[in-house]
Image (cartoon, grey):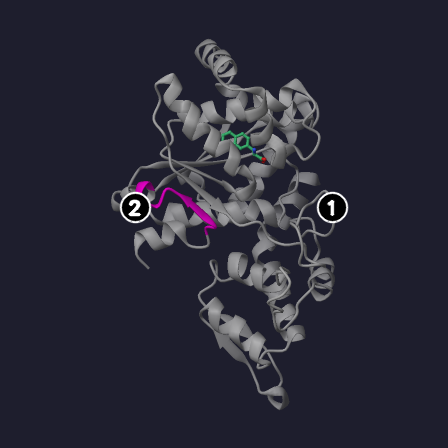
Amino acid sequence: MDTYDLITRNAEEVVTEEEVRELADDPDGKRVYVGYEPSGVLHLGHLLTANKLIDLQEAGMEVVVLLADVHAYLNGKGTFEEIRETAEQMKAQFIAYGLEEDNTEFVYGSEFQLDEEYTLDLQELQVSTTLNRAQRAMAEIAGNETAKVSHVVYPLMQTLDIEYLDLDLAVGGLDQRKVHMLAREELPELGYDVRPALHTPIVADLTSGEGKMSSSEGVTISMEDSTEELEEKVNSAFCPPTRDPEDDLENPVLELFEYHVFPRFEEIVVERPEKYGGDLTYEEYETLAEDLESGELHPADAKSTLATYLDELIEPGREKLREIRD
Ligand code: NAL
């Protein structure tokens, strides 16, 4: 796979392709970040952007993970003390999951976001950005809770972080796109460079194939799930073998194979008794999706295989969590 393809694989949006191509021409030492509001337990949403970071490390880039403690505070996630404690747990799980420890810089937002220069830049952004614009940037992140002043300061700080962490590329889920667009518009107003952004897809809800998989509603898979819980969740997932072009439902089982399993394993083996045709081996997501559609691969076999591979992926993080909690 060439470097541009590795950098952009499974990305839902690349802003702009031209800028990212330029990075891909000389990726060594380029700095890329994802920011996370600290959370004590990683779920598949976190791991989707983490997979992208692993791709970028493989491409030779330096990864910065922002443990966005001030942002979590602004978004009503608890006291600073609570947030910091969950941040340490989050960091340990990321490393267990596969981010290279000596190639990943973990930074707390509060390490630089309270400095005088940063604060003065933030005031300038508050003057130059309309309330409406900041609220719209935040709508997908805070849902319909955008009632507090802190919620409009939040995207302005996310904008400034891109400059203050000296980044060459911003990565986030598709729900971050309006913040990144705001950043692209506002950074030059302060005399700073525009940075490209990569957005990962949002996986559909596991049981319905609609909307997004989220930890606040519905079912999500996390580092906390036991093997049995994970199997149960995957086995009850929505997995229509053929797609009805009339509806917009996604197949979450296929999405999890595509975004979580294939990027991390060379080949996927579906174990089947001889009388059902014996084992199937896949090196590419597309072949597996075609077999599901044609009926060659039964949804029940797809699901049990998915559960096995996801279990392997979350096992080191689950182990780490157990260690921290004991
Ligand atoms: C991501 C988040 C918070 C602050 C950031 C600063 C710079 C870059 C990325 C950042 C978290 C993200 C979320 N907004 O919704 O989880």
Q: Identify the amino acid type marked 1.
A: Glu
Residue under label 1:
217
Left or right of 214 in this view: 10 = left
The picture places residue 6, in percent across and down from the top left corner, at 37, 53
Q: Quadrant of ligand 1?
A: top right
114 relative position to 63: left or right: right
Question: Can you name the residue that lies furthest to the left here?
Answer: 25
The residue positioned 69% from the left and 45% from the top of the image is 215
Residue 271 visible in rendering:
yes
Q: Is residue 97 left or right of residue 186?
A: right
Q: Does residue 288 sit above or below 122 in this rendering?
A: below
- Residue 115 counted in the magenta span: no
Vertical position of residue 2 compared to residue 74: above or below:
below
Disc assigned to residue 102: none
Q: Residue at x 70, y 24 (%)?
A: 147
Count of marks placed on residues: 2
Q: Position of residue 155 (x, y in %)?
A: 54, 26
Q: Secondary structure at mark 2?
A: helix
Asked if labels 1 and 2 touch by Cβ distance under 8 angstroms, the answer is no
Of 265 and 119, nearer the camera is: 119
**Residue 187 screen position, x and y as percent:** 40, 23
Q: Which quadrant holds the C terminus?
A: top right
- Dot 2 crowding, Cα within 10 Å, few <14, some 14–19, many 20+: some
Q: Residue at x 69, y 64 (%)?
A: 238
Q: Which residues are magenta?
A: 11-19
Closer to the N terminus: mark 2 or mark 1?
Answer: 2
Badge 1 marks a residue whose secondary structure is loop
Q: Which mark is residue 21?
A: 2
- On screen, residue 62 above or below 316: above
Left or right, residue 234 beside residue 258: right
Q: Amino acid at mark 2?
A: Arg
Distance Cα–Cα, label 2 vs label 1 = 37 Å
